[in-house]
């Protein structure tokens, strides 16, 4: 089996066919809610609940499926029978969402062999034979005494008298039966008239009873409707942050990884080229490049002070090295000078090693949403410095070696994957190699994950965790049209400001017996806050709407969120993920703001194959 197929036969989606690859979908949610997998028209299909029913894989049967009603008001019918609990659904079965609601036929492709219905066998008799000819009863013609044939005994007078007597008796009997029949008919007429009177009374009583029962049924239906509405309100009502944490924290994973930028021709790592911070090193570089220049002229052009021995710093700083940058052809920006040979003064680009972030499981088979800058840092602007501040550098022409500017700070807009400048003699292009791992909460095991999809427009990425089992997943909800300032939020993740929990793990393996390591035990933090502002991108059609070149975003008081919390889920107070935390900003007063990507962009990435 490769895909589930929904063939709609009525409702707003009549004559439509939807296909859902089993590699991406373990279950289908049917309803009018925008987060449903199979979405019905919210106005035309008003018999369908927001999340009316669900079709999922049967955990006990790899080729089986289950269907269940998810507490809808109008019920779900499988082949005309109302569902109670989970039921097996077979290819070709018909499902109706509510009495009189839309219908569809469930199917899979290709069908498994055991799902084919048996061939119907025709009657072995073939065409129906005509009924046998009816044989009527044989009646002898009366024999006349006068014309009795020869050889026959002639009937005597006594015999004739007996025959006449017998005929008279038979005639009387026939007359008696006739009058008896007439009497019976008359009696039947009387009985019918009497029955009509009684029947009329019974019909009237039955009609009254039916009307009474209909009224009772109507009252019961109204009571059930009120009960269901109350249950829905309770289900959609605000939940405590502790309740949301208890239910979904197992689906919030800790992500670690490392990456490096390489020359795809030599497959070797590339490095940012530095020079020793002295004039002799710069003169040696010019000599290596074959550039002839008068040292005094060089000193004067750079404003370098040298002593009597010709010694002096290229840059007036405490650093013993100077980074080199190349200008981008045709543009005002510049990029690090990259080489694929390490030297004592070069610095590795992209060897993050200890970087980490947060993600959350969105399907029970292990798909994870997180930020692009967590899953693929080489696709976003590179952050220079970190614990060691990058000293001022030299902006140098990549071909002539001419120094264009001194005291240059690191660029803020360099994306490693998009590097455009190369030094003389460099062959190849730049690409990234990476490894990513995810840990489930309260587990010491780091599990490998693969990058499935990365958004080109938003800070969103989709990963896949390949382990068996029915994993805890969060519920997603596109709140783009319903979210308001002041709405409560709950954020989970692994901020660097939170103390780490570690334990010693001792190997029980015969070949590594006794070895010990200190392993991280992830435990997500919970931040309770509220929506401070909703920022719309410049793509909005509303000219008065707040605009942002960074795209749509949700802003809130950051609380405990900090570096490492990137990629964490942002829940509304109904326990649904409405955004992905991606950044934070602090002030001198100690205030901290957080920002989230709306979950609609995560849903777009998940559904891009549909």
Image: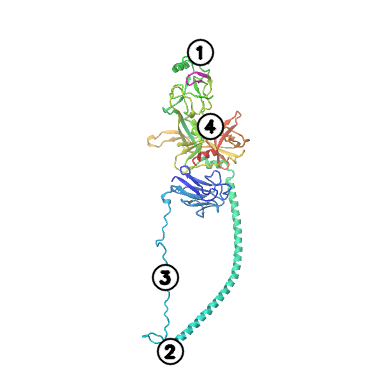
The disc, 1 or 2, on the residue closer to the chain's N-terminal end is 2
Question: Is disc 2 surrounded by few (<14), some (14 to 19) or many (20+) residues within 10 Å?
Answer: few
Q: Which residue is mark 1?
A: 297
Task: Give the CA distance from mark 4 to mark 3.
Answer: 98 Å
Task: Give the CA distance from mark 1 to mark 4.
Answer: 47 Å
Question: Is residue 159 something that shows in the picture?
Answer: yes
Question: Is disc 3 surrounded by few (<14), some (14 to 19) or many (20+) residues within 10 Å?
Answer: few
Is 187 drawn above or below residue 243 in the view shown?
A: below
Task: In the rendered structure, find residue 157 and report the number of the disc placed on it.
Answer: 2
- Judge left or right: residue 56 versus residue 218: left
Q: Which residues are magenta?
A: 395-404
The disc, 1 or 4, on the residue closer to the chain's N-terminal end is 1
Task: Give the CA distance from mark 3 to mark 2.
Answer: 42 Å
Is 293 drawn above or below residue 83 in the view shown?
A: above
Q: Which residue is mark 4?
A: 563
- Judge left or right: residue 589 versus residue 312: right
């Amino acid at each position: 089996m490769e895909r589930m197929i929904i063939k709609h036969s009525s409702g707003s989606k009549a004559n439509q066919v939807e296909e859902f690859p089993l590699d991406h979908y373990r279950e289908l949610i049917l309803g009018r809610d925008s987060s449903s997998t199979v979405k019905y028209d919210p106005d035309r299909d008003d018999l369908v609940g927001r999340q009316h029913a669900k079709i999922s894989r049967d955990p006990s049967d790899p080729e089986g499926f289950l269907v269940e009603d998810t507490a809808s008001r109008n019920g779900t019918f499988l082949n005309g029978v109302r569902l109670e609990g989970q039921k097996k659904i077979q290819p070709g079965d018909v499902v109706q969402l509510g009495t009189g609601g839309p219908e569809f036929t469930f199917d899979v492709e290709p069908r498994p062999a055991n799902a084919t219905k048996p061939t119907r066998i025709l009657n072995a008799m073939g065409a129906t034979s005509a009924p046998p000819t009816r044989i009527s009863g044989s009646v002898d013609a009366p024999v006349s005494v006068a014309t009795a044939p020869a050889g026959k005994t002639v009937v005597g007078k006594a015999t004739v008298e007996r025959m006449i007597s017998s005929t008279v008796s038979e005639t009387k009997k026939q007359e008696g039966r006739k009058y008896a029949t007439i009497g019976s008919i008359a009696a039947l007429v009387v009985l019918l008239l009497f029955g009509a009177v009684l029947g009329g009374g019974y019909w009237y009583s039955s009609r009254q009873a039916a009307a009474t029962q209909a009224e009772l049924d109507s009252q019961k239906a109204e009571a059930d409707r009120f009960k269901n509405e109350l249950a829905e309100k309770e289900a959609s009502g605000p939940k405590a942050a502790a309740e949301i944490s208890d239910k979904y924290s197992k689906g919030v994973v800790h992500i670690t990884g490392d990456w490096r930028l390489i020359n795809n021709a030599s497959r070797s790592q590339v490095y940012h080229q530095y020079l020793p911070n002295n004039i002799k090193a710069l003169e040696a570089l010019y000599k290596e490049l074959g550039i002839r220049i008068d040292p005094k002229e060089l000193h004067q052009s750079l404003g370098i002070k040298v002593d009597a021995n010709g010694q002096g710093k290229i840059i007036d700083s405490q650093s013993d090295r100077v980074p080199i940058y190349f200008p981008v052809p045709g543009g005002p920006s510049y990029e690090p000078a990259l080489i694929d040979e390490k030297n004592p003064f070069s610095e590795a680009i992209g060897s993050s090693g200890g970087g980490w972030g947060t993600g959350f499981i969105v399907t029970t088979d292990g798909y994870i949403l997180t930020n692009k800058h967590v899953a693929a840092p080489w696709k976003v602007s590179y952050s220079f410095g970190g614990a060691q501040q990058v000293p001022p550098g030299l902006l140098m022409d990549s071909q002539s070696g001419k120094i264009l500017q001194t005291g240059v700070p690191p660029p803020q807009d360099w994306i490693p994957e998009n590097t455009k400048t190369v030094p003389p003699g460099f062959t190849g292009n730049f690409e990234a190699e990476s490894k990513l791992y995810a840990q489930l909460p309260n587990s010491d095991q780091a599990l490998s994950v693969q990058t499935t999809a990365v958004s080109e427009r938003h800070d969103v990425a989709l990963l896949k965790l390949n382990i068996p089992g029915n994993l805890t997943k969060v519920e997603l909800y596109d709140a783009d049209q319903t979210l308001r300032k002041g709405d409560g939020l709950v954020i989970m993740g692994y901020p660097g400001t939170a103390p780490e929990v570690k334990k010693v793990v001792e190997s029980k393996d015969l070949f590594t017996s006794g070895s010990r390591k200190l392993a991280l035990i992830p435990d997500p933090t919970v931040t309770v806050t509220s929506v401070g502002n909703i920022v719309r991108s410049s793509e909005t059609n509303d000219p008065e709407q707040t605009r942002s070149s960074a795209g749509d975003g949700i802003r809130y008081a950051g609380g405990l969120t900090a570096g490492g919390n990137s990629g964490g889920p942002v829940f509304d107070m109904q326990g649904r993920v409405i955004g992905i935390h991606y950044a934070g900003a602090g002030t001198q007063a100690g205030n901290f703001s957080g920002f989230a990507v709306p979950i609609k962009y995560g849903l777009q990435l998940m559904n891009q194959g549909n």
